[in-house]
């Protein structure tokens, strides 16, 4: 049996009782560690906190393992119980559908145990979840790569008066271009996009595209460390949010669409 278990957003205690019971039944536990991080993931003792609570050793599954060596734990799941832990919900901010498909092809039974993710926790800012349009991802720009495909999706959301959740880039154990050219992988230091960087890039794209989809005066909500004790939520114009220190990762951003009276009251509550 392969258990794909959501861990929630805060710390090791956010796992559900059902998820914890499943982990304790497993012979091997892997933790996906490249699409998102729990708040403990930025502290040196974070992994040991998980292992102490769960009572089992945890193997970190980076992008290479999940994308290139998944057969290792899928084969193990053919004859024993294996847990694959995912920050948030297994099918929330990022999907692991391919893993389920591969497991099914091998005849491995799969059980998914859900949890909170950024996709529903963002409701804390007061904007109703059913007023959101398509979610977009904002990648880090480089000198030679400045993708802007998210612009069209934001445009369509705003035409319909819908809010847009922007998921901000996380770069963990990414190989450097130089090392790929040499054939021997070396990795970039971890990077986590801030609300401030996301807004700078969004405004740059608007300046280039010039369709007035949004601008400095567009109201947004910046959110940091959702689900943690020190989560931060601030509403204001893009220009105002550029000056806000949101603190440590992880961050996300909501571009506000048409608002309703209760939503407006909540935005005032979180406003600068």
Image (cartoon, rainbow, N blue to C red):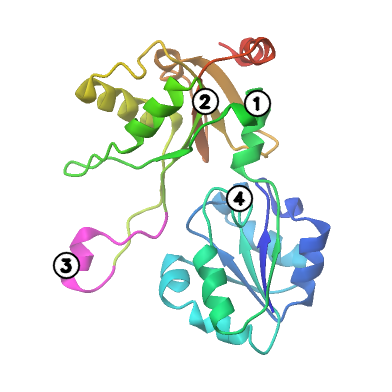
Q: Residue at x 22, y 66 (%)?
A: 179
The earlier-in-sequence mark between 3 and 1 is 1
Place of residue 211 in the rendered image (x, y in percent of width and height, measured from the top left): 27, 19
Location of mark 3 (residue): 181
The earlier-in-sequence mark between 2 and 1 is 1
Mark 1 residue crowding within 10 angstroms, few (<14) / some (14–19) / many (20+): some
Residue 73 visible at all: no
Q: Residue at x 65, y 16 (%)?
A: 263
Magenta region: which residues?
172-185
Disc 4 from disc 3: Cα separation: 33 Å
Q: Residue at x 32, y 56 (%)?
A: 188
Disc 3 from disc 2: Cα separation: 41 Å
Location of mark 1 (residue): 128
Mark 3 residue crowding within 10 angstroms, few (<14) / some (14–19) / many (20+): few
Of 159 and 51, which appears nearest the observer? Answer: 159
Location of mark 2 (residue): 163
**Image quarter (top left, top right, bottom left or bottom right) of the C terminus:** top right
* Residue 257 part of the magenta-drawn span: no
30 relative to 176, above or below? below
* Quarter of image, res 148: top left
267 relative to 197, above or below? above
Q: Between label 2 and label 4, give the one nearer the viewer.
A: 2
Disc 2 from disc 4: Cα separation: 25 Å
The earlier-in-sequence mark between 4 and 1 is 4
Do residues under tags 3 and 1 come within 8 Å of each other at their CB atoms?
Answer: no
The earlier-in-sequence mark between 4 and 3 is 4
41 relative to 24, above or below? above
């Amino acid at each position: 049996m392969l258990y794909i278990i959501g861990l929630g957003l805060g710390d090791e205690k956010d796992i559900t009782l059902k998820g914890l019971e499943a982990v304790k039944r497993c012979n091997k536990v892997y933790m996906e560690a490249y699409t998102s991080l729990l708040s403990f993931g930025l502290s040196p003792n974070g992994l040991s906190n998980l292992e102490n609570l769960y009572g089992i050793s945890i193997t970190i599954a980076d992008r290479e393992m999940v994308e290139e060596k998944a057969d290792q734990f899928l084969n193990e799941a053919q004859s024993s119980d294996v847990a694959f832990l995912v920050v948030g919900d297994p099918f929330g901010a990022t999907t692991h559908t391919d893993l389920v498909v591969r497991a099914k092809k091998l005849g491995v039974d799969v059980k998914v145990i859900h949890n909170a993710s950024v996709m529903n926790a963002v409701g804390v800012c007061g904007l109703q979840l059913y007023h959101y349009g398509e979610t977009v991802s904002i990648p880090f720009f480089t000198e030679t790569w400045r993708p802007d495909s998210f612009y069209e999706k934001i445009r369509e959301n705003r035409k319909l008066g819908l809010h847009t959740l922007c998921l901000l880039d996380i770069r963990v154990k990414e190989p450097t271009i130089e090392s790929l050219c040499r054939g021997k992988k070396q990795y970039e230091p971890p990077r986590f996009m801030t609300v401030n960087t996301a807004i700078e890039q969004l405004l740059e794209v608007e300046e280039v595209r010039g369709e007035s989809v949004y601008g400095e005066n567009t109201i947004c909500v910046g959110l940091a460390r959702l689900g943690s004790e020190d989560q931060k939520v601030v509403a204001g114009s893009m220009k105002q949010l550029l000056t806000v220190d949101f603190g440590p990762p992880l961050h996300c951003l909501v571009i506000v669409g048409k608002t309703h009276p209760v939503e407006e009251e909540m935005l005032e509550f979180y406003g600068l």
